[in-house]
Structures are given as structure tokens and as C-alpha cells.
């Protein structure tokens, strides 16, 4: 049975009041916002001295995201590693959610029924938000695009990849991808207008008739959209995919093949699809400055991209050596922890300028990316 949220004690020093949502009936907050506020109130109302540090971190997240408890809670969950000390309390404060199995960091050990139940809870409550990572022009250092990544409001240690794989296993892959796409398109309204937005989708979801309907309803200009194919195509998919995306591409939408170099069908996909962008996988970029084989493969991909009129983005740049080598090989743009971390904060996005960025930022150890 769900609990009614209790008022915050005056001593907590935090305000989790939410702003009314004009898109909700009667001006009520969205369910995800109400649930996040209830969880936060429960945690901050505690007095256990062992959890003092947890409460302090949560207050800091609230201060960074005023009136947005769902974003504050998500950032808090990604920061705190000692979730097992209070996950039972948080679970009790979430109304009308199915009970979760023991947390192990992966959806896969659970039965299909349990996985489906967890995915349905995420879909019903829209318990996900979007983080963006800057994509930088390697020649100028300016930010030219933003790659969208999905973050889940979950009390477990499951990665985004676990959630999408679990959804696919439960026959809910398309539903979760569309929920993530809707979140990314809504969040993109706060990005600087000069940035294009990388939207990750599987080939199967790109073939869904709902996709053009959803994209037509968004305010984001098609010229700022880049659909990034995240999976290898099945043998029968290339021709239907080209036909399905043709009207959208005619309106300015661009296509990218993601994780190129990570599976042997990459070249076949690229020849069929003729994408505007080829994104080289982190496995190819890692150590490219010291591994002659990786360097040769990267150079070959750049040459191939030039033949079909595509640009190359190096993914997962983490060292100055990798950055220098990718640039010298003719890769057009790059993203990675050296250039900028994924962030859910609109205040961070506003700093992404087309002008040179100066020194790259510090490496970030969070690898919960999709």
C-alpha cells in the first residue's frame, strides 16, 4: 500500500515543492515528479546518523535542480553508491509500483514476467530522463551537436543497456525506445539552437509507422535531428529502412550508423543506407594513438566515409593522445569524457558554444550510457 507523503521537517533545509505542469490535467504534477518528491521527503526526513552524508548529497542535488525533484533524485542515485542502506525505504514510498526483485545490477537473471513488470512500471510512470553529451568539432573545438542518452529513475544498479535489453526480451523494446525518444525530444527544447541532436533508435523502431508521426509532432526542426542506428540490420531490413526514412531525410533529417567498427556488418549497413554520419565505436578509438591496427582501421573508415560523402565521429575519446590521433586521421568530430561528460542539467547545455572550448574537461567515470 502506498504511503501519503509527509511534510518536510523544518530542519532538512530543502524544498522539494514542484511547479504545476500545464500539460497535466488540472495543473497537477506529472506522476514521476510526485513520486520523486515523495522519495526525497522520505530520505530527508530520516535522522539516522549513518545516512547524514546521503542526505547532504541529496540536498546538494535539490539545490542544483530547483522545482525538478525527478532530475535531482536521478542525479542523486547516480552519485550515491550505498543505495542498499535505504532502498527498502525508497521502494515503500513509491505508490502503486510492483515489487522489485533483489537488486543485482542486471535485469537478465529475472523471469520474463518480472522484467516485463519492471519495464511497464517505467513506462507508466515515465521514470526516465535524458542526459546530453557534447559532440565537438575536432578542428575548432566548438560544440556542434548533443548525443542523447537515457537515464532511468531506478533504485537498482541496472545500466541503460540492461533496461533496453530487458525491454526487448519482454517484447516492449519499441515502447521503451519511443518513451526515451519522447523524453529526448522534449529535453532538446533547452539545448542551444545551433546544436543537432543525436537520437538513438534500433532499425526495428525506425520501421515503426509511429516514428514519423512522433517526429512530425515535435517542435524540433528535422534539420537538427540525427537518427543513430544502434544495432546491426537484419538481412531483410536495409531496403525497407531506406524507403521508410526517405521522406524524413527529404525534410532534412540525417542518418548515422552508430558503433561502426564494432560488428562485421558495419560496412554493409553503410553501403545500403548511405548515412550522412559514421560514428566509430569506442572499441576502435581506445588506444588508437598507440595501436597501429586501430589507427589503420580508423584511417580506412575515414577514407571510406569520404567516398560516400559522410562525416566521421570518433566516440569515447578519453585521452589527449586519442584526440590528437583522431584529429590527424581526418575524423570530423568527436565525443567522449575528455571532451565533455553527459549531463542532465540545462545550465550545462547552455555553455556548449560553437566557439573553441579551450582545454578538454576531466575524465568522467560514469559509463552507464546507451
Image (cartoon, rainbow, N blue to C red):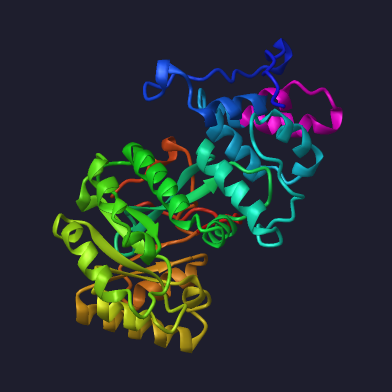
Q: Nearer the viewer, residue 73 or 96?
A: 96
- For image coordinates 71% across by 41% down, the residue present is 99
The prevailing secondary structure element of the residues shown in magenta is helix
Please identify the quarter of the rendering in which residue 267 is found: bottom left
- For image coordinates 22% across by 57% down, the residue present is 253
Q: Residue furthest top?
A: 10
Q: Nearer the viewer, residue 5 or 45?
A: 5
Residue 275 shows in the view: no
Q: Is residue 39 left or right of residue 311?
A: right
Q: Which residues are magenta?
A: 41-60
Check the picture and name the quadrant holding the N terminus. Answer: top right
Residue 29 on image: x %, y %: 48, 22
- For image coordinates 55% across by 60% down, the residue present is 161
Q: Nearer the viewer, residue 120 or 317?
A: 120
- For image coordinates 19% across by 74% down, the residue present is 309
Residue 304 on image: x %, y %: 27, 83
Residue 326 on image: x %, y %: 39, 73
Amino acid at each position: 500500500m502506498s504511503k501519503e507523503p509527509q511534510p518536510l521537517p523544518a530542519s532538512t533545509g530543502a524544498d522539494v515543492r514542484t511547479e504545476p505542469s500545464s500539460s497535466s490535467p488540472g495543473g497537477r504534477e506529472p506522476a514521476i515528479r510526485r513520486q520523486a518528491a515523495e522519495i526525497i521527503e522520505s530520505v530527508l526526513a530520516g535522522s539516522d546518523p549513518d545516512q547524514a552524508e546521503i542526505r547532504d548529497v541529496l540536498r546538494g542535488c535539490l539545490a542544483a535542480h530547483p522545482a525538478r525533484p525527478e532530475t535531482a533524485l536521478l542525479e542523486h542515485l547516480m552519485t550515491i553508491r550505498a543505495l542498499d542502506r535505504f532502498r527498502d525505504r525508497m521502494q515503500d514510498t513509491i505508490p502503486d509500483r510492483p515489487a522489485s526483485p533483489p537488486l543485482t545490477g542486471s535485469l537478465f537473471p529475472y523471469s520474463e514476467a518480472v522484467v516485463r513488470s519492471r519495464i511497464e512500471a517505467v513506462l507508466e510512470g515515465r521514470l526516465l530522463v535524458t542526459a546530453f553529451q557534447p559532440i565537438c568539432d575536432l578542428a575548432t573545438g566548438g560544440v556542434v551537436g548533443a548525443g542523447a542518452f537515457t537515464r532511468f529513475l531506478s533504485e537498482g544498479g541496472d545500466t541503460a543497456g540492461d533496461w533496453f535489453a530487458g525491454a526487448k526480451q519482454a517484447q516492449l523494446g519499441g515502447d521503451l525506445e519511443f518513451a526515451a525518444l519522447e523524453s529526448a525530444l522534449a529535453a532538446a527544447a533547452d539545448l542551444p539552437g545551433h546544436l543537432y541532436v543525436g537520437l538513438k533508435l534500433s532499425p526495428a523502431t525506425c520501421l515503426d509507422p509511429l516514428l514519423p508521426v512522433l517526429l512530425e509532432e515535435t517542435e524540433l526542426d528535422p534539420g537538427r535531428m540525427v537518427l543513430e542506428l544502434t544495432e546491426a540490420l537484419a538481412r531483410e531490413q536495409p531496403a525497407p529502412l531506406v524507403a521508410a526514412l526517405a521522406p524524413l531525410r527529404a525534410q532534412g533529417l540525417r542518418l548515422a550508423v552508430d558503433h561502426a567498427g564494432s560488428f562485421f556488418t558495419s560496412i554493409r549497413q553503410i553501403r545500403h543506407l548511405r548515412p550522412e554520419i559514421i560514428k566509430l565505436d569506442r572499441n576502435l578509438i581506445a588506444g588508437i594513438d598507440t595501436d597501429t591496427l586501430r589507427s589503420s582501421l580508423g584511417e580506412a573508415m575515414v577514407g571510406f566515409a569520404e567516398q560516400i560523402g559522410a562525416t566521421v565521429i570518433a566516440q569515447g575519446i578519453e585521452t589527449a593522445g586519442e584526440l590528437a590521433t583522431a584529429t590527424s586521421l581526418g575524423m570530423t568530430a568527436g565525443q567522449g569524457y575528455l571532451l565533455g561528460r553527459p549531463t542532465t542539467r540545462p545550465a550545462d547545455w547552455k555553455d556548449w558554444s560553437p566557439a573553441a572550448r579551450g582545454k578538454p574537461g576531466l575524465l568522467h567515470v560514469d559509463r552507464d550510457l546507451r
